[in-house]
Image: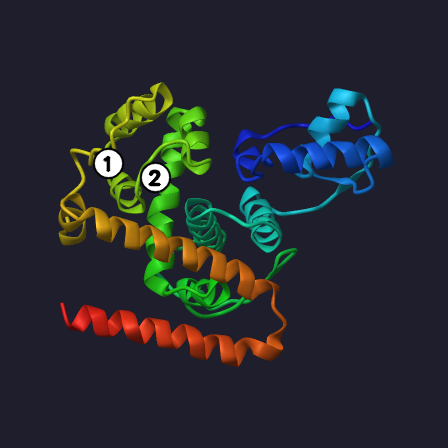
Amino acid sequence: MQEIIIDEEFKVLLPALDAETFRLLEESVLQHGCRDPLVLWNGILIDGYNRYMICSHHDIPYRTVNMEFDSREEVLIWIISNQVSRRNLTPIQLSHFRGLHYNAEKKIQGTYDRTSQEIKKSQNGYFQSGSTSGRLAEQYNVSKNTIMRNSSLAEAITSIGEASPEAKRKILHGEVQISNSKLEALSRASKDEIETVAAEIEEGTFEGRKPRNAPLTETDDASESILPEIRKLNSIISDFACSFNSMFRQMSGGGSAEVKTVLRSYIDQLEDLYKNM
C-alpha cells in the first residue's frame, strides 16, 4: 500500500468533521469499506483525510488515486474548490479560502498588481486575462474589496501558522474569538508581534488586542467602540452571507433571477439604513 504523507498546510484545509458526522462516516466505512479512493499528489494526501484516519485506526484497506499538479499553489486551489463546493464552511473558513485562492493564483501568475495577459491552462482550468480579484469576486459572489481583504486575512493566518500551527487551527475551527479586521491588521504586523499573538492564541490568553505596529484605520477605530447590538448585527449578516452563498451554489440556475431580486431588496434596505444614519 502506498505510503501516505500528511502535509500540515494541506491538512488544515481539510476541516475535521463534527463528532456525529464522523461517527456516521466511521459506521459506513466499517460496514461497507472505504468506497472512495484517497486523493494524493506526490504521495501527499489532498482529499480524504477523515477516511484515511478511520481506515488507519481500524486497519481497513483503501485505494488511492494520484493527481498531477505543477505547483503547491495549484494543489491549494484544487483543495479549496473541493472544500467550498461540498461543505458548509464557517465565515472565517470561507474568508480564509477566498484569500488563499487569490494569493495562490497571483503567485502562479507571478505578479500581485498587474493584470495577467496570458491564458494559462492547468489542471484547475484556465487563468484568463482580467482582474484576478474581479474573477474571484464573481466566482464567490462577493465584492472585489472583500477578495482583497480576504487576501490580507489569509496572509495573517499563514504567518500565525508558521509561528504556531495550533494557533492557526484554533482560528480556523472557531476556538478563539478574533475578528476579520484584526486578522487583516495582523498582515501588516511585525514578525515579533505575530509570534506574540500566536503564542497567546495557543495558550488561550489572547484577548483580541490590535497589533502595535499596524496603522489604525477608521474602520478599526470604529470597531473597537462598536455597540453590542451592532456586533450582533455584523454576526447575523456574516452568517447569512455564508449560508446564502452555500445555498446558492447548490441551487439550479432556474431560480437565480428571483433569488437575486430578493437579495437586492435586502441590500437596498441596508443602504437606506446607512443613508439615514
Of residue 50 and residue 194, the one placed in the foreground of this image is 50
Q: Position of residue 86 (x, y in %)?
A: 62, 52
Q: Is residue 68 above or below residue 58?
A: below
- Label located before the other in sequence (1 or 2): 2
Q: Nearer the viewer, residue 53 or 196?
A: 53
Q: Is residue 198 above or below residue 70?
A: above
Q: Which residue is mark 1?
A: 189
* Cα gap from disc 1 to disc 2, whole angstroms: 9 Å
The part of the image, by quadrant, that contains residue 19 is top right
Query: Which quadrant of the figure has residue 127?
Result: bottom right
Q: Pointer 1 and pointer 2: residues touching (CB < 8 Å)?
A: yes
x and y percentages locating residue 174 in the rendered image: 42, 36
Residue that numbered label 2 is attached to: 156
Q: Is residue 161 left or right of residue 208?
A: right
Point 54% across, 29% down: residue: 8
- Mark 1, Cα crowd under 10 Å, few <14 / some 14-19 / many 20+, is some
Q: Quadrant of residue 273?
A: bottom left
Does residue 61 appear left or right of residue 253 in this picture?
right
Residue 185 at x, y percent in the picture? 24, 43
Place of residue 47 in the rendered image (x, y in percent of width and height, measured from the top left): 67, 41
Q: Amino acid at mark 2?
A: Ala
| Disc ID at residue 263 | none
**Can residue 253 be seen at all in this image of the molecule?**
yes
Number of residues whose C-alpha sits closer than 10 Å to that of mark 2, classed few (under 14), some (14–19) or many (20 or more): many
- Asked if residue 112 can be seen in this view, the reply is no
Point out the residue furthest to the front here.
229
Above/below status of 214 relative to 163: below
Residue type for callout 1: Ala
